[in-house]
Amino acid sequence: MLSTIVDAFKVPELRKKILFTLAILALYRLGAYIPVPGIPFQEFATAFQDSGVSMTMLDLFTGGALSNFSVFSLGIMPYITASIIMQLMQGVIPAVGRWAKEGESGRRKITQITRYLTLILGLINAVGYLFLFQSAQYGVTFSTEVPYVLTSLLIVFTLVAGTAFIMWMGELITQRGIGNGMSLIIFTSIVSRVPSAIFSSINMEADMGFGIAVTALIIVVVLICIPAIIFVERAQRRIPVSYAKRVQGRKVMGGQNTYIPLKVNAAGVIPIIFASCLIYFPAQIAALFNIGWLTSFADAISTGWVNWILTLVLIVFFAYFYTSMVFNPDETADNLRKQGGFIPGVRPGSATVQYIKNVINRVTLPGGLYIAVIAVVPSILFFFTNNQLIQAFGGTSILIMIGVALDTMSKIESQLKMHNYDGFFK
């Protein structure tokens, strides 16, 4: 792997993309420590330590920016939520569904609406946090030297601007860097919390030696699980395809055999991200209205058996939903017919469509259950141990980190093969 990284830096174009991506991510991490003007930083940080479980999880996805009340406190969640809404709208609103099929022009329309929706959701969240953090729970008080209205407007504007800036940085990485910018930002947020979680795990026990042993055990278990997760992430169900021979003049076309690769986990980490956003969305609404019962409801579905069941169901649902969005059996069967291809033993047309649908359904269920179990089991362990390292190294975090890492490595791999270098996957 080290030689592959060296090879990557030998390619000027790839080196620029990697350095550009790292620079943007460093800028993102810097913004997580720049506090919003007008906030008593130390008092707020102390009060945030006693916040509920839902706020702690939101802080995990912002890389600690929320607990610092920094300019990036809203994190990437408004954009992710907006993306979920637009994905759902493709199946509900015919016009949006047509845009998704129009190619580049349609994607630009969807992207533009997603941006506007992100700013609207960011504004709602910013106002909600402003009210929440002035409540008795946090007790943030503004300086009397500046008018209250002016300070409030400054805080809300700063938070929304921070969200817009994160969205811009993510798109910059996608366009000019390596990998998916939004996924890399989430990856960076999660990884940045690991060092502090390790120290917290060591110090949570009265006997430091026992704390070190527990922490080492957790890390060893995680390292053992990573290869197994990578194996499943790269697993495929291959549908065999044959092409009939065609004679054009003196040339014989077709006649070869190939396959349609269907990944066991075709949706990647998207179901986990979508499920997490929906589960912690009530916490964002509770932050807006600051209603006791709504906050209690948000905390209830953020931990315990309700959270575990809800997470499992939502992940499996989104695994099917997202797979159906990215893989269309009708289009696949039609393309096979046009190219003279067929699945051995299956009649062309509707029979081929139904066969592909059946295979997708059979593959998606174990794939969805696999990522659901990996996401839920660490949550159960954290519930009984309260070890912060299990939360930081939870199934959701591990799957997101591995999924983003594999996707980024695949992008680098394709770039290296263009320049005749060996990639990561040999």
Image (cartoon, helix red, strand yellow):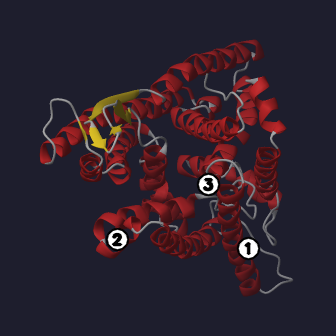
Which residue position holds label 1?
A: 158
**Disc 3 residue type?**
Met
Label 3: state its secondary structure: helix
Which residue position holds label 3?
A: 182
Quadrant where the N terminus is found in the figure: top right
Q: Earlier in the sequence, mark 3 or mark 1?
A: 1
Q: Residue furthest front?
A: 250
Label 1: state its secondary structure: helix
Q: Is residue 172 above or below residue 212?
A: below
Would residue 395 be seen by someone viewing this image from the given angle?
A: yes
Whether residue 175 sits left or right of residue 103 in the image: it is right
Q: How many marks?
A: 3
* Residue at x 65%, y 42% (from the top left corner): 190
- Cα–Cα span, label 2 and label 3: 25 Å
Which residue position holds label 2?
A: 98
Q: Nearer the viewer, mark 2 or mark 3?
A: 2
Q: Between 294 and 365, which is closer to the camera in this rendering? A: 365
Quadrant where the C terminus is found in the figure: top right
